[in-house]
Amino acid sequence: MRLPKVLFVCLGNICRSPLAEGIFRHQIARRVPDHPMIVDSAGLDDYHVGEPPDARTLLVAHQHGITLNHRARLITPEDLQRFDYILAMDRSNLRKLQKLARQYGIADPPEIRLMRDFDPQPDSGEVPDPYYGTMEDFEAVYQILDRSIHHFIDFLLNSVIRSESPQHR
Ligand code: 4NP
């Protein structure tokens, strides 16, 4: 089974997208063991490049049994060629990603979607930026991501199964 390559993107790559990456790794390892996947996260601004995730991101991940091993990095043109799916945390991230794909002249860009397109309770449709918030905001982001990623994995597995079924060969 060939699983798609997935990149999570937010603004600073220290709060939402590294948490999304960690939750995705955690869930996929349980649901599809022995299928190592290419998954990463990146940011659209360079304020925090090289830094580990925000202490509150690390804490909320730890409270849910997830260890994050990531250093913030900027998205690159190669990311827009290499990944199959790019998940944006909010509409501003989405617009910037679409603009970068146009600027870089990427011929066959990845599918760029909002993370909460996969959330059965999408509310505003965005994963709110918790940077100026409290631990409660980080826990709320965790819950949104945990739920959205569960449904995103359902979607990935369904599309992989469909594409690998005999009538699609
Ligand atoms: P993130 O959160 O995009 O979820 O990583 C932010 C992190 C840092 C800043 C803004 C949002 N900042 O302004 O430094």
Image: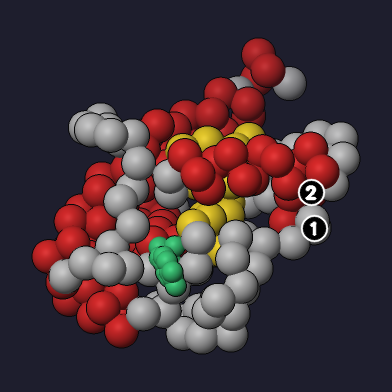
Question: Residue drawn at (63%, 35%), measured in percent from left and top?
Answer: 111
Question: Residue drawn at (43%, 48%), measured in percent from left and top?
Answer: 89
Q: Name the residue under label 2.
A: 81
Residue 55 visible here: yes
Amino acid type, callout 2:
Gln
User: Whole-percent x and y of residue 47?
Assistant: 55, 76
Q: Which of 50 and 47 is in front in this view?
A: 47
91 lies above or below 33: above
Callout 1: helix, strand or loop?
loop
User: Whole-percent x and y of residue 140?
Assistant: 18, 56
Question: Residue drawn at (58%, 51%), measured in percent from left and top?
Answer: 6
Label 2 neighbour load within 10 Å: few <14, some 14-19, many 20+: some
Question: Residue drawn at (54%, 29%), measured in percent from left and top?
Answer: 159
Q: Is mark 1 within 8 Å of ligand 1?
A: no
Cα separation between marks 1 and 2: 5 Å
- The C terminus appears in which quarter of the rendering? top right
Amino acid type, callout 1:
Glu
Quadrant where ligand 1 appears: bottom left
Whether pointer 1 and pointer 2 mark residues with C-beta atoms closer than 8 Å, the reply is yes
